[in-house]
Each structure stands twice: as C-alpha cells, then as structure tokens.
Image (spheres, grey):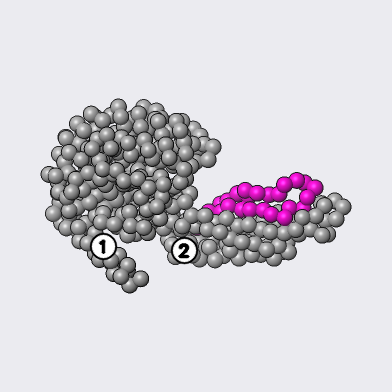
C-alpha cells in the first residue's frame, strides 16, 4: 500500500505544491483564513471528498470526509499566518501535506476499513481553533489525529509547552503631563512596574517556565498622561500544572503594577490555554520509520524532549486522543520559525519536498495503525470510550 501512496502523492504533486504556494502568497490571520480554507477544501472536494464548511461554528473550519470504515483517522490542516511576517511558521506546508495524505489514503479507504477525515483547523497561532473544535465535537469519533509541521530540522516525537495567552489592560486618568501631572494616574507606569516585577520573577522560575510579551498600547501622546495601556503576554511551562503556578505568580506582578500606579487593571484570556503536546509513542515510532525511509534523519529520540516547539493547540488534542505533531525539516539557511527568512524558505524546493514527504509519511502512519491488529483495536476502543463519555456528559447536562 505504501507504493500506492507514493504513486498517489506523485500524481497530485502539482496540485499540492500549487496549494502550498497559493496559501503562502495570501497570508491570512486567525479566524479570517477565508481564502486559505476555501482553497484547501476545494482541492479535497475535487478529489471526491465530502466537505462540510463552518464546522464547530467557526467560519474558517471545515471537515472533509472520504470512506466509511469503522476506524476514523483525522489529519489536521492549519493555514493561518502571522501578523506582518506571513507564513513564517509554514502553515501553507501543513495544509498541503494534510491534503496530500488525505488524497493518498482515499483510494485505500475501503481496503483499510477506514474513514479519512481532513480537518481544516484555523487560528493555531492565536485563538486556539483546535481547542474550540475539540470542545464542540469536531474530533468526535476519531481514533487518532495526525499532522506535520515544518521546521529547521526533522523531529519525529516533537513536544511543546503548555501556554496561557493573556491581555492585560491598565486604566488610569488623563492629565496634562506638564501643567497638571498631579491629576493624572499613569497607566504606562503601571505597565512598567509590572514588567519590572516580571523581570525580577525570572530568576525564580522553575525549569521550562517562560514569560514573554509586548506593550501593544502605551498611550497616545507625550503630553497626555496615559489613561490606558495594554500588554499582551504569553506564559509557558512544561506542564499544565507548572503553567498554573506561573500564571498565579505573573498575575501578582500585573496587580502590583496597577496598585503602585494608582490604576485599575483587567486581564482577558485571548486564547484558550494550550496544553503540552503528548505525542503517541506508537504513532511516533511508525512515523519515524517511514520518514527515515524517505532519506531524512530526525533528531534522536533521547534529544527530542530538549527541543520543545513553543506551544500548539494540537497539544490539547493529544490529551484527548492519540496524535502526533512531528516536525519536518526544510532548508532555511539558519533561519528559524517566526522569522521573515523562514517564511521565504517555505516556498522553496526544499519546502515542496517537505509537502510530499510529509504527506507520504502521514498516510503511511495511518496505514500502519489500521493494519496492525492491536493498534487498530486500541484506536477503535478509545474512540468508542470517548463517544460514550461525551454521551454521558450531554445527558448529565
């Protein structure tokens, strides 16, 4: 069957690369990926997939299905970009590789006894599209969920950090900064004090904890005491439990800034919390074997845990059902994700190869799971258990 996968991917090569380049050329931000979602869904429809749009009440999410086997395999396609620097995380490659895997599996669906479901998952960079889709049932019935993400090197068992995405608004009072500063309450000072507190906190962080952010609104003019400032902050940690501890300590710094400057403050959650990525060991081993056969040399397993990939909402998925989120390497001349140079690398010959290699490896991983009796039973029983748990939850509500 893997030779048939190779033939199917080769046959669709032009369409897959065209999709990758087209998404890259028109970058769209979280929950506004209308063109990208439409392009991705349309290509699947052309190859015979039944496409449902606006799933989970998200206008740019979709579900494309082929086959009717009892084991449903999900393949996640991301396509959102970053502000100003576009596809510097290579989501155009993710979408095209996911479509390629789906197209390769479709002709085999009846023989494998599987249902192939390609899920268009918006807003990974900010917004947590997969978290919302998970909560609203879009992943129901899946035995496993697979995807592949580009990076500077190959990592089969990639991991990531848990993350909280916060917006902190400080509110004070305007006044003339020269003639009557005593009447003002400086919201920018509140942000400064908070950042000093966060900076001092860094020396006491636990291993794996991180904090980084920006001041997105610092006032309107030098001669007006700022009455409003806003900070956008990411907090990260190796586990959700460690993230909860970090969040409690960071919130105290925000509160201290407001108190010191005589301001009030409000904290808003921008995205649902992302949990740490827990790749399924069996699926990782299957993917590793396949990607090595394509000539790639992924990072050794004992080194994978030392290279967390930031954070991803795919982590939430892997806490509910078996899944993988490997990294597939592209040549980027030393550039890393979220740099403009990496965005440029995502439409090169190396990036195009990653689309095809990723599609073949994801499809091969699905075949391996579907044809291994023990793994097939594991995935089927897990899906059934989750269906029963959701049914009980709905009935209880």
In the picture shown, does residue 332 fall above or below 142? above
Residue 134 point in image, percent of width and height:
36, 56
State yes or no: residue 48 in magenta. no
State the mark number for residue 242: 2
Magenta stretch, residue numbers: 209-236
Q: Is residue 89 above or below residue 129?
A: above
Q: CA distance from mark 1 to mark 2?
A: 30 Å
Front in this rendered view, residue 236 or 205:
236
Residue 390's place in the image compared with 116, above or below, is: below
**Camera-side mark, 1 or 2:** 1
Label 1 secondary element? helix
Residue 373 has which mark? none
Residue identifier under label 1? 387
Q: Is residue 62 visible?
A: yes
Q: Can residue 284 be seen at all in this image of the molecule?
A: no
Compared to residue 263, the image places residue 323 above or below, namely above
Q: Residue at x 63, y 57 (%)?
A: 169
Magenta stretch: includes residue 229: yes
Judge by depth and name the residue closer to the eye, 108 or 149. 108
Q: Is residue 162 left or right of residue 141?
A: right
Residue 249 appears at what percent x and percent y?
A: 56, 65
State left or right for residue 268 relative to residue 123: right
382 sits left or right of 125 in the view: left
Q: Which of disc 2 and disc 1 is earlier in sequence?
A: 2
208 lies left or right of 395: right
């Amino acid at each position: 069957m893997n030779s048939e996968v190779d033939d199917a991917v080769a046959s669709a090569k032009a369409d897959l690369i065209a999709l990758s380049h087209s998404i890259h050329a028109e970058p769209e931000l979280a929950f506004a990926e209308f063109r990208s979602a439409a392009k991705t869904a349309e290509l699947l429809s052309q190859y015979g997939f039944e496409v449902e749009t606006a799933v989970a009440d998200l206008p740019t999410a979709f579900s494309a299905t082929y086959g009717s086997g009892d084991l449903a395999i999900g393949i996640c396609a991301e396509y959102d970009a970053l502000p100003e620097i576009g596809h510097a995380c290579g989501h155009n490659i993710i979408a095209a590789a996911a479509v390629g895997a789906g197209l390769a599996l479709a002709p085999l669906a009846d023989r494998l006894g599987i249902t192939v479901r390609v899920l268009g998952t918006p807003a990974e960079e900010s917004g947590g599209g997969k978290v919302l889709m998970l909560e609203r049932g879009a992943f129901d019935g899946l035995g496993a969920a697979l995807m592949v993400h580009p990076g500077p090197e190959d990592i089969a068992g990639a991991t990531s950090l848990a993350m909280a995405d916060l917006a902190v608004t400080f509110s004070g009072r305007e006044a003339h900064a020269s003639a009557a500063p005593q009447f003002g309450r400086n919201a920018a000072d509140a942000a400064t004090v908070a950042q000093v507190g966060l900076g001092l906190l860094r020396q006491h962080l636990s291993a794996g904890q991180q904090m980084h952010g920006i001041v997105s609104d610092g006032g309107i003019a030098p001669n007006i005491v700022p009455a409003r400032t806003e900070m956008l902050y990411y907090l990260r940690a190796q586990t959700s439990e460690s993230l909860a501890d970090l969040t409690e300590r960071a919130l105290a710094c925000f509160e201290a800034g407001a108190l010191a400057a005589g301001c009030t403050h409000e904290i808003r959650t921008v995205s649902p919390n992302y949990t740490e990525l827990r790749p399924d060991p069996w699926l990782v081993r299957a993917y590793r074997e396949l990607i090595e056969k394509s000539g790639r040399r992924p990072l050794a397993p004992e080194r994978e845990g030392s290279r967390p990939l930031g954070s991803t909402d795919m982590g939430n998925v892997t806490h509910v059902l078996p899944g993988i989120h490997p990294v597939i390497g592209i040549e980027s001349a030393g550039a890393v994700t979220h740099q403009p140079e990496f965005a440029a690398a995502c439409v090169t010959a190396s990036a195009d190869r990653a689309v095809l290699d990723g599609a073949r490896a994801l499809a091969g991983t699905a075949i391996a799971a579907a044809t291994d009796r023990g793994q097939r039973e594991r995935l089927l029983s897990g899906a059934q258990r989750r269906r029963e748990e959701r049914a009980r939850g709905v009935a209880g509500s």
